[in-house]
Structure formats: C-alpha cells, structure tokens
C-alpha cells in the first residue's frame, strides 16, 4: 500500500518515525521513511494530541509535511490549522477564516462562528457554563498567540497547580520545554499544594543508549545512565523556566521497591 493521504494520531506517526529518526544520514533517513510509508505521501495530518517536534522535523526533512490543528467536538471540530504555505511546528496554526478566536484575560481560548455549536442537548445549565455573556464559547484550554499570529496551546485551564506559597503554575508550561529534547521521552509536573513542584522525567532509552555508546567504557557504569540526562532539566531550568524557581526533578522509572530510581534537586 502506498497512500497519498494519511491522517492518524501521534502514536502512529511516532512508530513510523522510529525506523529513521536515529539515522544521521539525511538520504538514508528519507529512504527509511519512504520504506515504511510507501513513499507517496502528499498530505499528512496528525490529531488527537500534540505530536513531538522531533517527529515532525524528521518527516519534514525527508520532504513530508505533517499538518496539525486545534479544535473540539463543540467547534465541528477545527478552529485553527497549520497550512503547507504557513506553518510553525511549535503551534497549532492560525484561525480558519470562518471562525473568530481570541484569548480571555486569564488566557483561556474563546471562539465563535457558524461552526461552533449552539449548546448541549436539554442541558441549559451546562450550556450557560461554557459560553461567555456575549456569546463566546469557552474551550477550557489556555493559549497564547505568537507575534506572527499562530496559536500555541499552553495548558488546560483546570490543570493549573497552586503551590503552598500561593503561586499558580500551568504544568504544561514546564513540560513543553522538554518536548523536543531527544534525551527525554516524557515529563510530568506535579506538586499541587506543596512548597515545590516536582517533575517526573522518563528517559528516551534509545537516545540515552546511543549517547552512552560514545562514552568511554570506564564511564559506562550503572550511575552513568542517569548522569547522561540528569543535567538536562537543570539546563532547561536555568535557561528557560520561569514558572517555579523551586522546581525539582526525578528520573524514572522506579527501582524494584517502587522508589524513584534517581533524584536530583
């Protein structure tokens, strides 16, 4: 099968990319992607969740652009979309011409237009809660616009953490800083009601193993594995993080007794 159009969720795109993403030679990387996709893709779409930037860049470097957008069932469903002639991999695109999108004072994404639904069936209370007084639909997502008009999704409004010191922190602001880090597979920030936030960090085992392959044999003892990536949260925190000055992180998975395998304050 050699499809021209392919649309799927991020997990499928990530599985396809595994065949080539670690290949350093661009020609070989393109050949491997062509082998697993059929080599005839012309239009590609990823939806349901955010796709890792490294996957999008791998496909784009091989000549295939994966488009992402944003919307909800209540908006039928698309509100914004990247286009082949106007895209940014760190965004979900620009609003469609048929809808209006703006941000509330707290950053919540609001929308209105003919494709936005009129309300929930026989549930006036729920309908009233999801619209502003002047008729804008409240998506429940927090976002921001770039200087060139692209929308970025920052967090779900209900997911904001409140520290013991009273500071409101959207955890996705921190988690997104690591989305394009090849050493990091997943980051989860938690700590609501605590003095400090903690980030659970799951390593990308393949990338770490490749890195350790370049390390001198005497450095490849068990402690070398977390050491290969433990510095990265510190680097990101020092260079970019502004959401919580007391962020700590843990490297996962846990040991056999269920305790975090390694911790770094």
Image: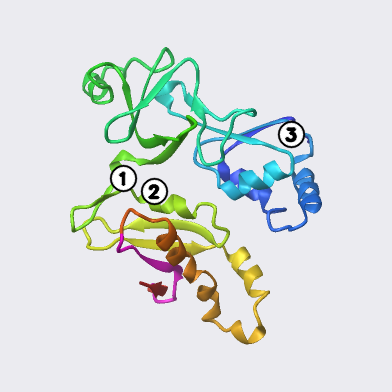
Contact between marks 2 and 1 (CB within 8 A): the answer is yes
Q: CA distance from mark 1 to mark 3?
A: 37 Å
First-in-chain label (1 vs 3): 3
For the point 74% across and 44% down, which residue is it? Answer: 62
* Residue identifier under label 1: 159
Q: Quadrant of residue 111?
A: top left
Indicate the quadrant containing the C terminus: top left, top right, bottom left or bottom right.
bottom left
Q: Indicate the secondary structure of the residue bearing disc 2.
A: helix
Residue 54 lies, with reference to residue 256, above or below; the image says above
Asked if residue 175 is among those painted magenta in the image, a careful observer would answer no
Placement of 158 over or under 246, stated as above or below: above
Within 10 angstroms of label 2, few (less than 14), some, or many (20 or more) residues?
Answer: some
Horizontally, residue 199 falls left or right of residue 97, namely left
Crowd tier of the residue under label 1, counting other residues whose Cα lies within 10 Å: few below 14, some 14–19, many 20 or above: some
Viewer-closest of 258 and 102: 102
The residues tagged by marks 2 and 1 sit, at their Cα atoms, a distance apart of 9 Å
- Which residue is labeled 2 in the image? 172
How many marks are shown on the rendered structure? 3
Expressed as whole percent of the image width and height from the top left, the position of residue 91 reads 50, 37
Residue at the (73%, 57%) spot, across then down? 23
Residue in view at x 72 percent, y 53 percent: 20
The x and y percentages for residue 179 are 50, 52
On whether residue 253 falls in the magenta region, the answer is: yes
Residue 5 position, x and y percent, is 70, 29
Depth check: give the residue in front, 256 or 189: 189
Residue designated by label 3: 41
Q: Of discs 2 and 1, which sits in the foreground? A: 2
- 241 vs 213, nearest the viewer: 241
Q: Position of residue 148 (x, y in %)?
A: 50, 31
Q: Which residues are magenta?
A: 245-258
């Amino acid at each position: 099968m050699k499809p021209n159009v392919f649309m799927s969720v991020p997990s499928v795109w990530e599985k396809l990319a595994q065949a080539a993403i670690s290949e350093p030679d661009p020609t070989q990387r393109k050949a491997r992607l062509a082998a697993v996709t059929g080599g005839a893709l012309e239009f590609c779409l990823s939806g349901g969740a955010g796709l890792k930037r490294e996957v999008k860049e791998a496909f784009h470097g091989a000549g295939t652009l994966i488009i992402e957008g944003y919307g909800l069932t209540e908006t039928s469903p698309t509100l914004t979309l990247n286009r082949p002639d106007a895209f940014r991999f760190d965004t979900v695109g620009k609003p469609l011409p048929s809808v209006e999108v703006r941000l509330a004072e707290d950053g919540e994404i609001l929308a209105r237009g003919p494709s936005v639904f009129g309300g929930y069936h026989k549930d006036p209370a729920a309908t009233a809660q999801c619209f502003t007084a002047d008729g804008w639909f409240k998506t429940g997502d927090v976002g921001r616009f770039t200087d060139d008009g692209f929308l970025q999704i920052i967090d779900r409004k209900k997911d904001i953490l409140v520290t013991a010191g009273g500071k409101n922190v959207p955890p996705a602001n921190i988690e997104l800083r690591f989305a394009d880090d090849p050493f990091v597979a997943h980051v989860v920030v938690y700590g609501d009601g605590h003095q400090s936030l903690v980030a659970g960090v799951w390593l990308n085992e393949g990338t770490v193993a490749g890195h350790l392959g370049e390390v001198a044999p005497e450095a490849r003892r068990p402690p070398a594995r977390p050491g290969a990536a433990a510095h990265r949260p510190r680097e990101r925190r020092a260079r970019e993080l502004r959401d919580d000055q007391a962020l700590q992180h843990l490297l996962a998975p846990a040991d056999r007794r269920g305790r975090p395998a390694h911790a770094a304050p």
